[in-house]
């Protein structure tokens, strides 16, 4: 089947099964952490601070991690990060179930997860090439991976809302900790036949600068990563202050589950669309179009006086955010030299994971002054300006 042609590769099938289990658990934890932070404090600023700490270490450490990922075994690196992430989720579960959880615990353990992600993200993304024997199937593999993530993004908040309402946040964390066993099993069962190109050894700083020069000189990769960074700051952190919108529109975690589930459905729609494409041609233009759509959707939240308006708007926010993320990922992985892929994907991680904590902190601070809905509208206006600048910077005939 053309839609799922990448699944003919055994290693990638194993990856989807194991990763699918884990990502579902990850979204349970994301929901539980966001809801617990707001439940404990009732503060939009704390929501933004917790969201910032969950992601802040990633952009700081990822550029250096990318150099090391190009040297190390990517499979072994992912296995180590999964064990550490399992321990982090187990700690969240223990503190919550024993009644000792505080905002300080959420912040410290969030910082730990961000540090783990700094190594996991470039290793995982660049490892996709080794799981796929036929390079022409790589765009489909990236799209299917995004689809799997967004199925979890769609179902996770709904399941988490039910669990939190019924038994509290602790079970969400415990399920997440157990889910990492699936990833570890799938990685152990893989038979890797595509060798990992080794970058030349040298000083980490020198290789990092080499990667930065490569990205800055590339006419497609540079504007794509800059646009991803802007979209992440202005729109990618929407989940961090969404509990404040949910409280305004309805009661309890169910409303938050509906809003995040709607965004997840939109993201899944984008991923499924990209999966049925036969090539990466035209994706650079699509990044600009989806960024424009994100700006419009964020502004449209001003009209969201009820859940019946907010949910469809969040669906389009999800469509545009995922279209930007997945299109950038596919474009970068298609055009970047293999021996520099770990370093470039680490900069992709900086743009994506770095923008989210900055956006969460800024939006939380602004929302505490003018309200969450007006904050989204302001972000939308700025996103439109960045999208127009991106379109002007793009080469006339991009990949």
Image (tube, grey):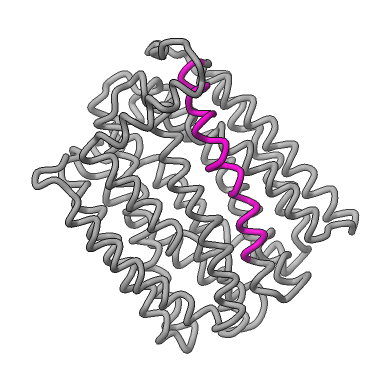
Quadrant of residue 132 within the rendered picture: top left
The relative height of residue 265 versus residue 70 in the rendered view (above or below) is below
The relative height of residue 399 versus residue 242 in the rendered view (above or below) is above
**Which quadrant of the rendered structure holds the N terminus?**
top left
- Tell me what residue is drawn at x 66 percent, y 43 percent: 113
- Tell me what residue is drawn at x 41 percent, y 11 percent: 200
Q: Is residue 154 magenta?
A: no
Q: Main secondary structure of the magenta part?
A: helix
- Tell me what residue is drawn at x 55 percent, y 44 percent: 23
306 or 379, which is in the foreground? Answer: 379
Quadrant of residue 298 within the rendered picture: bottom left
- Name the spot of residue 136 as percent of width and height, x first: 23, 27
Highlighted magenta segment, given as a residue range? 48-71
The relative height of residue 271 versus residue 250 in the rendered view (above or below) is above
Q: Is residue 56 magenta?
A: yes
**Which quadrant of the rendered structure holds the C terminus?**
top left
- Name the spot of residue 37 as percent of width and height, x first: 72, 65
Residue 211 placement, left or right of 366? left
- Name the spot of residue 394 as percent of width and height, x first: 18, 49
- Tell me what residue is drawn at x 80 percent, y 53 percent: 105
Residue 317 placement, left or right of 139? right
The relative height of residue 225 versus residue 128 in the rendered view (above or below) is below
**Badge count:** 0
- Name the spot of residue 328 as percent of width and height, x first: 31, 45
268 or 10, which is in the foreground? Answer: 268
- The furthest residue to the left: 396
Residue 354 placement, left or right of 115? left
């Amino acid at each position: 089947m053309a839609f799922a042609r990448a699944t003919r590769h055994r290693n990638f099938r194993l990856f989807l099964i194991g990763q699918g289990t884990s990502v579902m658990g990850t979204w349970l934890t994301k929901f539980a952490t966001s809801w617990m932070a707001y439940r404990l404090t009732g503060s939009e600023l704390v929501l933004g601070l917790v969201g910032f700490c969950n992601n802040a270490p990633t952009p700081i450490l990822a550029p250096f991690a990318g150099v090391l990922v190009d040297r190390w075994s990517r499979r072994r690196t992912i296995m180590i990060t999964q064990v550490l992430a399992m321990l982090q989720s187990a700690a969240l579960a223990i503190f919550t179930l024993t009644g000792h959880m505080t905002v300080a615990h959420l912040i410290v353990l969030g910082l730990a997860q961000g540090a783990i992600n700094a190594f996991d993200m470039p290793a995982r993304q660049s490892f996709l090439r080794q799981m796929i024997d036929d390079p022409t199937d790589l765009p489909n593999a990236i799209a299917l991976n995004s689809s799997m993530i967004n199925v979890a993004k769609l179902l996770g908040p709904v399941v988490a809302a039910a669990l939190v309402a019924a038994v509290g946040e602790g079970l969400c964390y415990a399920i997440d900790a157990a889910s990492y066993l699936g990833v570890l099993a799938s990685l152990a069962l893989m038979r890797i036949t595509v060798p990992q190109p080794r970058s030349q050894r040298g000083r980490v700083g020198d290789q990092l600068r080499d990667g930065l020069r490569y990205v800055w000189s590339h006419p497609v990769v540079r504007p794509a990563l800059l646009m991803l960074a802007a979209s992440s700051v202005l729109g990618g952190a929407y989940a961090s202050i969404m509990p404040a919108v949910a409280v305004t529109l309805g009661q309890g975690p169910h409303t938050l589950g509906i809003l995040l589930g709607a965004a997840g459905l939109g993201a899944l729609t984008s991923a499924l669309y990209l999966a049925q494409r036969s090539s990466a041609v035209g994706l650079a233009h699509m990044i600009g179009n989806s960024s424009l759509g994100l700006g419009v959707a964020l502004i449209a939240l001003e009209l969201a006086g009820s859940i019946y308006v907010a949910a469809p708007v969040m669906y389009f926010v999800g469509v545009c955010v995922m279209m930007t993320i997945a299109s950038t990922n596919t474009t970068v992985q298609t055009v970047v030299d293999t021996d520099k892929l770990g370093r470039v994907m680490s900069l992709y991680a900086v743009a994506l994971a770095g923008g989210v904590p900055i956006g969460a902190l800024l939006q939380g601070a602004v929302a505490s002054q003018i309200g969450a809905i007006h904050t989204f509208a302001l972000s939308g206006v700025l996103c439109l300006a960045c999208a127009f600048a991106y379109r002007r910077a793009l080469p006339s005939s991009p990949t």
